[in-house]
Image (cartoon, rainbow, N blue to C red):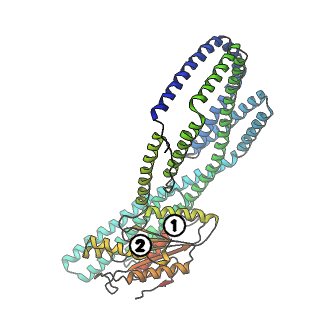
């Protein structure tokens, strides 16, 4: 067996090499000092030759950074005065950049640099051409934002008057009810209480509507805005449809609905203005990003220009050094140092004994950090590297355990919500390139709270484990993502699965759980544990998100609950599979 060299031998060699390098470095420094006086004069002359070019480049870089700051401020404007001032500053800054590029072009000596400067000048002209469009977009955004703010203020005033008016009438009804109660006029008292209930419900619905409208002011994307609009209109229609028995209640209802309606319905409603402001800001932001990118290109070019000038100075200084007789001594010493280094370290030993194992170990560490826990570990005869590999083996084991913990639900053994959301998001990204149907099955254990209350949480945990085990054993769910989504909710991701097949699988799941015959005395379905299932099938597009799919599946689950539980519902249709034994 080949023996391993002691680690201290390598340390001695490295220490000796270090002493030699230090000695040679000091020698080179002494020679350099002898050359510094003459070299300094000639280098100063070269620097003066490039000084104006460097100054212009630095000013250009500074102006480019100012323009980027202006672009960022323009994307966050909230007043007309600020918009006008920033647009003026933006136009002035582009003119300053154009002037700086003209100065650098007049000083450029190479065709390649002149071509690059002309290209940057062309970008500046394009940015200037976009100025009117940018002004129009920002003006539209500010105008829409102001209109939306006025409507929000109007709705706040309406809200205060609405609450005051309804509460006042409720107070009157309370006093009248007390009088009727004292006189024992029960028939009239019943009518007054019904009117009080109707008005209280009207007040509650109205307050919820005002809350939704107020949330529009904080909305940051169209999807959220559309959702708020739908919910607001649903509440508004509910207010209009609510029946009122008394004339006073009907007058209150008619009066306040007539004040709300112009702010919520029509072309000039609060949602339209908010959407217009949001879209205009987004489009203007795109143009501002393009302009900021052009400014960044100019700043990058300026930095490269300064760096190139510095390199030219250093290169010329190296040429001056090469003309010195003393530089021959430095070359000789460098050659001796290189030869001694090769002799001392032995290239084969460094390459295969240190460099390659270190690279292999580094690659293995990066792979493990990227959660590739099946990565093979390198072999080495070096003691320190072998210790590192041993530690890496332990780290690999820990990484595998951590990965499993981060993906698996500790109670049921199913995947957890984090892993499910990650895989679904990856599938959506992939589906954008190759569209295909995918389905989500979301189910919930019926009356599970009553089960826990009656049998205890330990039995509840056992119930969830039993359901999870039966689902994982189903042939239809093999190689599918089955996860616990929270509490007694479970979810299944079925890629490349259309609506028909998804509904069939969901029904098989429902039957499978029902046939487990887990006792549940509070269940109306033969006193066994049952589940309600929601199914969502979609062909993803660029607007499809994880949240939108889950919301649809949850809506279908809600419909299954409302339909009496122990059934399957599909999003958006009345098609379902009813309860079966």
**Residue occupying the point 71% across, 31% down:** 100
Judged from this view, the residue extending furthest toward the right is: 111
Query: Which sits earlier in the primary sequence, circle 1 or circle 2?
Result: 2
Mark linked to residue 505? none
Q: Position of 182 compared to 392: left or right?
A: left
Where is 24 relative to 202, above or below?
A: above
Residue positioned most to the front: 1
> Disc 1 on helix, strand or loop?
helix
Q: Residue 58, image x and y in percent?
A: 65, 29
List the residue tagged with mark 1: 548
- Residues 509 and 398: in front is 398
Callout in the foreground (1, 2): 1
Report the residue marked by disc 2.
251
Q: Quadrant of residue 459?
A: bottom left
Residue 260 appears at what percent x and percent y? 48, 65
Residue 10 is situated, as x and y percent measured from the top left of the image, at: 49, 32
């Amino acid at each position: 067996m080949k023996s391993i060299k002691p680690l201290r031998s390598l340390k001695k060699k490295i220490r000796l090499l270090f002493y030699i390098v230090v000695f040679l470095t000091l020698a080179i420094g002494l020679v350099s000092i002898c050359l510094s006086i003459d070299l300094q004069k000639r280098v100063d002359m070269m620097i003066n030759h490039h000084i104006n070019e460097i100054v212009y480049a630095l000013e250009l870089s500074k102006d480019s950074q100012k323009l980027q700051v202006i672009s960022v401020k323009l994307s966050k404007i909230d007043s007309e005065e600020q918009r006008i001032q920033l647009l003026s500053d933006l136009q002035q800054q582009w003119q300053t950049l154009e002037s700086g590029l003209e100065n650098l072009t007049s000083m450029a000596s190479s065709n390649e640099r002149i071509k690059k400067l002309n290209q940057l000048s062309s970008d500046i002209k394009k940015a200037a051409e976009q100025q009117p469009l940018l002004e129009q977009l920002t003006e539209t955004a500010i105008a829409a934002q102001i209109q939306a703010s006025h409507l929000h203020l109007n709705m706040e005033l309406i809200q205060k008057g609405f609450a005051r008016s309804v509460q006042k009438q409720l107070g009157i009804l309370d006093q009248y009810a007390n009088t009727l109660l004292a006189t024992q006029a029960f028939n009239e008292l019943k009518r007054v209480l019904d009117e009080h209930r109707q008005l209280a419900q009207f007040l509650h619905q109205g307050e919820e509507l005002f809350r939704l409208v107020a949330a529009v002011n904080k909305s940051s994307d169209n999807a959220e805005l559309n959702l708020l609009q739908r919910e607001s209109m649903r509440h508004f229609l509910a207010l209009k449809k609510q029946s009122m028995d008394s004339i006073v209640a009907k007058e209150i209802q008619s009066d306040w609905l007539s004040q709300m309606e112009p702010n919520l319905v029509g072309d000039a409603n609060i949602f339209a203005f908010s959407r217009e402001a949001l879209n205009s800001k987004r489009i203007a932001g795109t143009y501002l990003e393009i302009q900021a990118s052009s400014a960044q290109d100019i700043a990058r070019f300026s930095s490269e220009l300064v760096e190139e000038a510095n390199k030219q100075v250093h290169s010329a200084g190296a040429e001056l050094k090469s003309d010195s007789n003393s530089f021959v001594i430095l070359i000789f010493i460098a050659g001796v140092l290189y030869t001694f280094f090769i002799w001392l370290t032995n290239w084969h030993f460094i390459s295969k004994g240190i460099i390659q194992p270190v690279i292999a170990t580094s690659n293995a560490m990066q792979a493990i950090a990227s959660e590739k826990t099946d990565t093979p570990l390198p072999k080495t005869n070096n003691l320190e590297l072998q210790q590192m590999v041993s530690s890496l083996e332990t780290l690999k084991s820990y990484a595998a355990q951590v990965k499993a913990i981060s993906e698996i639900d500790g109670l049921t053994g199913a995947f957890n919500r984090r892993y499910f959301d990650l895989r679904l998001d990856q599938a959506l990204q992939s589906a954008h390139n190759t569209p295909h149907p995918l389905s989500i099955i979301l189910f919930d254990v019926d009356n599970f709270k009553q089960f826990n209350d009656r049998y205890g949480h330990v039995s509840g945990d056992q119930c969830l484990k039993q359901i999870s085990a039966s689902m994982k054993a189903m042939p239809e769910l093999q190689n599918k993502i089955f996860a616990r989504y929270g509490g007694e909710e479970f979810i299944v991701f079925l890629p490349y699965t259309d609506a028909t097949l998804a509904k069939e699988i969901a029904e098989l799941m429902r039957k499978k759980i029902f046939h487990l015959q887990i006792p549940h005395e509070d269940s109306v379905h033969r006193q066994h544990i049952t589940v309600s299932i929601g199914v969502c099938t979609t062909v993803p597009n660029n607007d499809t998100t994880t949240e939108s799919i889950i919301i649809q599946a949850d809506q279908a689950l809600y419909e299954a609950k409302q339909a009496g539980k122990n059934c399957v519902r599909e999003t958006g249709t009345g098609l379902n599979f009813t309860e079966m034994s």
